[in-house]
Image (spheres, rainbow, N blue to C red):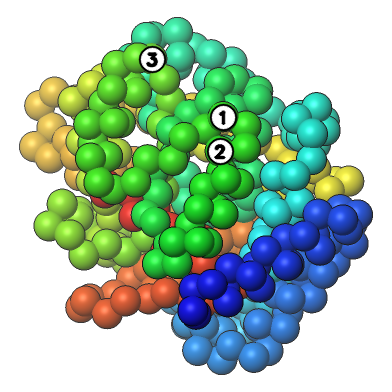
């Protein structure tokens, strides 16, 4: 019953967003984000603690401003994703600019498939939707939500331009098949994971348990690894950034998986430092133990999404 009620509430909100002009939807999302900043003391404090550790030299006032921006951004993200998934494909294309598109074409041309990676940063979900139109559909690694109705709803959003969602069950085989067919696969690398496959790399000068799947698959298949990021630009539009492919470690590297994972994490950290208000600071990225860290309510996709070690 709880799952059905949650689904009905989200469906009602999605319908409201669908009939709302985009600028007004953005305003509504910002308001929701600020509301959670005020009411959700637990995740507000996690955010402030993480920012204090990452940016110890910045004044408290500045860090608190970044925290407010983070909550506002994720409120907007939710509403903009719901809106973006309902507009025409032609309008989707008019709302995005691409930086580094030639790098994508060169990566596909190698014929080994492409591994795209990012984090819970900027407009990563919108990026994946638009990528299918700009280039070709991809497989998106994700964990299913606990609520099966909401999971089916989110899958419809993610696949509205032809992408497929790859869940953890049999994921490695599906990823390898996709790469063997020359297709792209996207995954996130910034969630704390507890599986034996995790490797510890430095993220903001602190050890963070990170999926080894990206590096292991890249080294096994030779598929190029391309960092991707989506940032907002003027006029309510988005810039889809495809950065330089990550160079693989040398053959004599004593820990090629760890080294490649660190290189990917370094690129992610560079973008988070550049745009600190666009990353999911309310996630307990650095921690020991086995406690779950799920963010309820407005962030179901962010909190339960792709632990990339599928």
Judge by depth and name the residue closer to the eye, 186 or 69.
186
Q: What mark, if any, has residue 154 been given in the picture?
A: none
Q: Is residue 155 visible?
A: yes
Q: CA distance from mark 1 to mark 2?
A: 5 Å
Furthest toward the front, the residue is: 1
Q: CA distance from mark 2 to mark 3?
A: 19 Å
Relative to residue 178, is residue 226 drawn left or right? right
Query: Mark 1 falls on what kind of element?
Result: loop
Residue 211 is situated, as x and y percent measured from the top left of the image, at 27, 51
Q: CA distance from mark 1 to mark 3?
A: 16 Å
User: Which residue is painted at 68% across and 89% down in the image?
Assistant: 38
Query: Mark 2 falls on what kind of element?
Result: loop
In this rendering, the answer to whether 29 lies above or below 245 is below
Residue 180 is situated, as x and y percent measured from the top left of the image, at 29, 16
Q: What mark, if any, has residue 159 been given in the picture?
A: 2
User: Mark 1 Cα within 10 Å, few/some/many (few <14, many 20+)?
Assistant: some
Q: Quadrant of residue 11?
A: bottom right
Judge by depth and name the residue closer to the eye, 154 or 95.
154
User: Which residue is painted at 72% across and 83% down in the image?
Assistant: 35
User: Residues at badges 2 and 3 in contact (C-beta under 8 Å)?
Assistant: no
Relative to residue 227, is residue 289 drawn left or right? left
Q: Which residue is mark 1?
A: 162
In this rendering, the answer to whether 175 lies above or below 211 is above
Q: Is residue 26 visible?
A: no
Q: Which residue is mark 3?
A: 182
User: Residues at badges 1 and 2 in contact (C-beta under 8 Å)?
Assistant: yes
User: Which residue is painted at 64% across and 70% down in the image?
Assistant: 8
User: Which residue is painted at 74% across and 76% down in the image?
Assistant: 32
């Amino acid at each position: 019953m709880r799952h059905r009620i949650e689904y009905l509430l989200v469906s009602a909100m999605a319908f409201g967003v669908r009939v709302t002009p985009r600028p007004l939807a953005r305003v509504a999302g910002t308001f929701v984000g600020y509301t959670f900043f005020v009411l959700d003391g637990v995740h507000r404090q996690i955010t402030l603690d993480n920012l204090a550790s990452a940016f110890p030299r910045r004044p408290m006032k500045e860090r608190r401003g970044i925290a407010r921006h983070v909550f506002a951004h994720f409120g907007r993200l939710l509403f903009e994703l719901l809106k973006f998934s309902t507009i025409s494909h032609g309008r989707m294309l008019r709302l995005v600019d691409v930086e580094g598109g030639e790098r994508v074409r060169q990566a596909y041309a190698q014929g080994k498939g492409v591994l795209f990676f990012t984090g819970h940063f900027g407009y990563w979900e919108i990026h994946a939707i638009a990528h299918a139109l700009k280039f070709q559909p991809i497989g998106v690694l994700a964990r299913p939500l606990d609520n099966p109705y909401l999971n089916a709803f989110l899958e419809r959003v993610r696949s509205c331009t032809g992408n497929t969602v790859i869940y953890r069950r049999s994921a490695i085989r599906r990823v390898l098949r996709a790469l063997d067919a020359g297709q792209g696969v996207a995954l996130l690398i910034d969630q704390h994971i507890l599986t034996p496959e995790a490797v510890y790399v430095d993220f903001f000068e602190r050890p963070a348990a990170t999926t080894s799947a990206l590096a292991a698959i890249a080294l096994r298949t030779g598929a190029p690894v391309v960092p991707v990021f989506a940032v907002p630009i003027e006029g309510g539009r988005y810039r889809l950034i495809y950065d330089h492919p990550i160079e693989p470690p040398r053959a004599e590297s004593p820990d090629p998986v760890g080294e490649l994972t660190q290189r990917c994490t370094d690129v992610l950290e560079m973008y988070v430092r550049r745009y600190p208000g666009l990353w999911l600071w309310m996630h307990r990225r650095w921690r020991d133990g086995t406690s779950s860290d799920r963010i309820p309510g407005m962030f179901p996709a962010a909190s339960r999404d792709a632990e990339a070690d599928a």
